[in-house]
Image: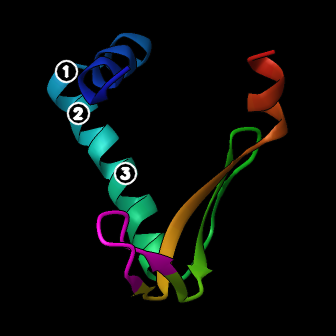
Amino acid sequence: MNKNDLVTAVASAAGLSKSDAAKAVDGVFQAITDALKGGDEVRLVGFGTFAVANRAASEGRNPRTGAKITIPASKQPKFKAGKGLRDSIQ
């Protein structure tokens, strides 16, 4: 499922036009992004939790040359599925 499929499904389920559903989907994505940027978690009970994890700097190798390279520290978005979601797909 891609974003257009999601918009179509939301429009059908909520009885909205596709343009209104697209605005709603974009709004949800933007709200999650803004919360993560602000350092907050987004916890959707029964669905899952979006959070930011800090990755420490590490050392790797360039696969082409074999030279050592430093991989800088970074922040990564993480999603942990909730019990309701896990149970519904089994």
Would you identify the image quadrant in which residue 87 lies?
top right
The secondary structure type at the circle numbered 3 is helix
Q: Describe residue 41's horizontal placement relative to residue 27 as left or right.
A: right
Chief secondary structure of the magenta span?
Answer: loop
- Do the numbered discs 2 and 1 sit on residues whose CB atoms are within 8 Å? yes
| Residue located beneath label 1 in the image | 18
Q: Amino acid at mark 3?
A: Phe
Instruction: Calculate the distance from the C-alpha at mark 2 to the C-alpha at mark 1.
Output: 6 Å
For marks 3 and 1, give the CA distance.
Answer: 16 Å
Could you say where residue 84 lies in the image, as x and y percent from the top left?
Answer: 80, 31
From the top left corner, tell me how far across and down residue 89 is, in percent: 74, 17
Residue holding disc 3: 29
- Neighbour tally class for label 1: few under 14, some 14-19, many 20 plus, Cα within 10 Å: some
SS at badge 2? helix
Which corner quadrant holds the N terminus?
A: top left
Give the magenta range: 60-68
Give me the C-alpha separation between circle 3 and circle 2. 11 Å
Q: Nearer the viewer, mark 3 or mark 2?
A: 3
Please tell me which residue lies in front, 54 or 33.
Answer: 54
State which quadrant residue 43 falls in: bottom right
Q: Residues within 10 Å of mark 2 (few under 14, many from 20)?
A: some
**Residue tagged 2:** 22
Depth order, front residue of 90/38: 90
User: Tag 2: residue type?
Assistant: Ala
Closer to the chain start, of discs 3 and 2, is 2
